[in-house]
Image (tube, rainbow, N blue to C red):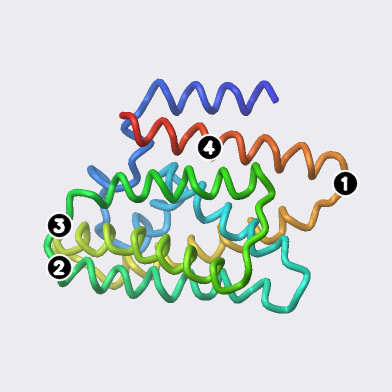
Amino acid sequence: MKKMILTLLGTLAFPAIAFAHPGHDMANFVSGFSHPFTGIDHLLVMLAVGYWAGQSQSAARWQLPLQFVLFMLGGVVLGAMIPGMAFIEAAIAVSVLAMGLVILLNTSFNRVWQLVLTTVFALLHGFVHGQELVAAGNGMAAVAGMLLATIILLSAGVYLASFKNQLGLLFQRGFAALLTLSGAYLLIM
């Protein structure tokens, strides 16, 4: 618990790392791979979508992560083609907050709404990276690295959802609180 509080305080003390998008070097595979682990919004949403998918007991538990990766890639393509939109950062902050509330409240959505939310969040996260890649004048290697890291984080989220004991429930509440607070913080900064 102490480490989680220190991590949260560190994130609050250094808000530049809270935004996953401006100022990151997306020049090659390594920078693309490290980006999802260093951008707090990307890290939290990937783990959350994986966790949310992992709570499903059906074989469709891997459908959300796969869909997220595919639509994030689609968002990268859209971002490379469409000029910047001012609301994207706020929408990404809302995605962090929304996933926090969904997990915190243990909200049950029908499958269609799960797929819709996952699609929207994936497009948003991909879109901003597509713009970043065009601005930096590079591309495929960084995207490949980013997609691999995203798959790892989504899979980690699915794995974390498999813990159903007391420690798992404590993790769920702590993680949901961190998501919710981080999303709220990103919206107001």
List x then y, in percent, for residue 55: 72, 60
Of all residues, the one furthest to the right in this rendering is 165
Is disc 2 placed on a helix, strand or loop?
Answer: loop
The residue that appears at 67% across and 61% down in the rendered structure is 158
User: Residue 15, relative to residue 91: is it above or below?
Assistant: above
Question: What label does residue 82 carry, if any?
Answer: 2
Left or right, 110 with respect to 66, comes to right
> Which is in the foreground here, disc 2 or disc 4?
4
Mark 4 in CB contact with mark 3 (< 8 angstroms): no
Residue type at the position of mark 4? Thr
Residue type at the position of mark 3? Gly
Label 2: few (<14), some (14–19) or many (≥20) C-alpha neighbours in 10 Å: few
List x then y, in percent, for residue 136: 16, 58
Inter-mark Cα distance, 2 to 4: 30 Å
The residue that appears at 27% across and 56% down in the rendered structure is 26
Inter-mark Cα distance, 4 to 3: 26 Å
Left or right, 36 with respect to 132, comes to right
Inter-mark Cα distance, 3 to 2: 7 Å
Is disc 3 placed on a helix, strand or loop?
Answer: loop
Look at mark 1 in the image and give the residue it sits on. Answer: 165
> Which is in the foreground here, disc 1 or disc 4?
4
Inter-mark Cα distance, 1 to 3: 45 Å
Among the 4 quarters of the image, the one containing residue 30: bottom left
Label 1: few (<14), some (14–19) or many (≥20) C-alpha neighbours in 10 Å: few
